[in-house]
Image (cartoon, grey):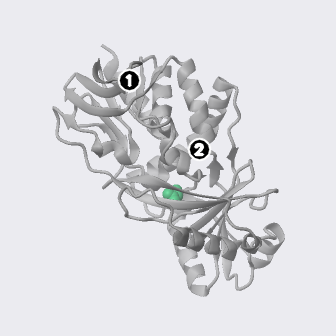
Amino acid sequence: MGGGLIGLASAWRLAQAGLRVAVYERGGFGGEASWAGAGMLAPGGEIEEPSDFASLALASRALYRAFVRELEAATRTEIDYQECGALDLAYSDDEWRALQHRAERQRALGIASKAVDPKQVAIFWPRVRTENLAGALFYPDDAIVNPRELCRSLVLACTKAAVELFSVSAVEQIHVSPNEATLYVKTITRKNRKVIIGRRFRAAVLAAGAWSSSIPVSGVPAPPAVEPVKGHLVGYQQPDQTCNTILRHGHTYLLQRANGLLIAGASVEHAGWDRSLDPAIAARLASEASFVLPHLAETTPSEIWIGFRPSSDHLQLGPWHSSALHLAYGHFRNGILLAPKTAADLASSLSRISRP
Ligand code: GLY
């Protein structure tokens, strides 16, 4: 199991289901895609066609408020979760037709939206560019969460629920047999020596995001490949709340956290594990952001960062070859959104197999 949002949420639910759980994490807990994600819980911008993925995403969206509230109560922490809706903007007739066509298909999935007249946009979203605005659609059910706060609270919740959290140098191998999985992890002793430790479990969950297929697995066929898809994001620390709804135009989205950080994202790059920040990509995001919110043209982003989305041929969720290995990766652009449902589904299937 990895210590990102999917692994931590699952560990918490599994512990609540009465299982003894350990999480092994190579970097910091919640330190990769969960830290980098903007935190959109936005089927309106991400889902267009019926699919299993779409059903899971919508089910997870429906679980979110209760998930956050339960986590806040369990840890006495506050999590920035805003049911703020999203506004999709069209600045040409072609863009407006495309938005309306998408909204019709989404309505069949139960994703609600309603047209907003450009004059109303000017009244209710006074900072949004209305010059040449052909139309806009409001998605009332889209929301945002601060994934960094979620992970912080989940680490606390896991600790309170007696989940063992291990920071290791690497997970070297998972050996799987029908009724158990052995995890071999590399760790550094107090005397600074590297040692490999093996530990047996009734089941193992592979939830290492974009790294999931780099962990060697033996005893069963290799789990499906996952590719890192890099995304750049830019952030503006704003003195005031200037973006109280998710805004979308084309491939760009904007949202603002309660702490004032206004985020614009995101690039989609098939660039392997390249962690470099590209100033040209950041400048393009900033230009797209200031197109939608012209007041941003007067300021430069205070932060630029990247993350690696886990892309697989589809969402990998459930037991692998009826073995003790369970997969939970390949959430691609929607890992934050899918966390509560992934965790609930894993807890329900694993608590079944773990009972004698
Ligand atoms: N969830 C949006 C993104 O991956 O950029």
Q: Is residue 308 left or right of residue 132?
A: left
The furthest residue to the front: 191
Q: Residue at x 50, y 66 (%)?
A: 278
| Picture coordinates of residue 85, whole percent (x, y) | 68, 57
- Report which residue position mark 2 lands on: 147
Q: Residue 222's mark?
A: none
For the residue marked with disc 2, what is the amino acid?
Pro
**Viewer-proximal residue among 133 and 182:** 182
At x 41%, y 52%, the residue is 53
Residue 170 seen: yes
Residue at 69% x, 43% y: name it.
80
Residue 171 image offset from top left, x and y in percent: 32, 33
Considering the numbered disc 2 on the image, is that residue within a helix, a strand or a loop?
Answer: helix
Distance between the alpha carbons at the discs numbered 2 and 1: 33 Å
Residue furthest toward the top? 356
Residue identified by numbered label 1: 192
Say which amino acid is labelled 1: Asn
Q: Seen in the image, is 258 located left or right of residue 7?
A: right
Q: Is residue 101 above or below residue 69?
A: below
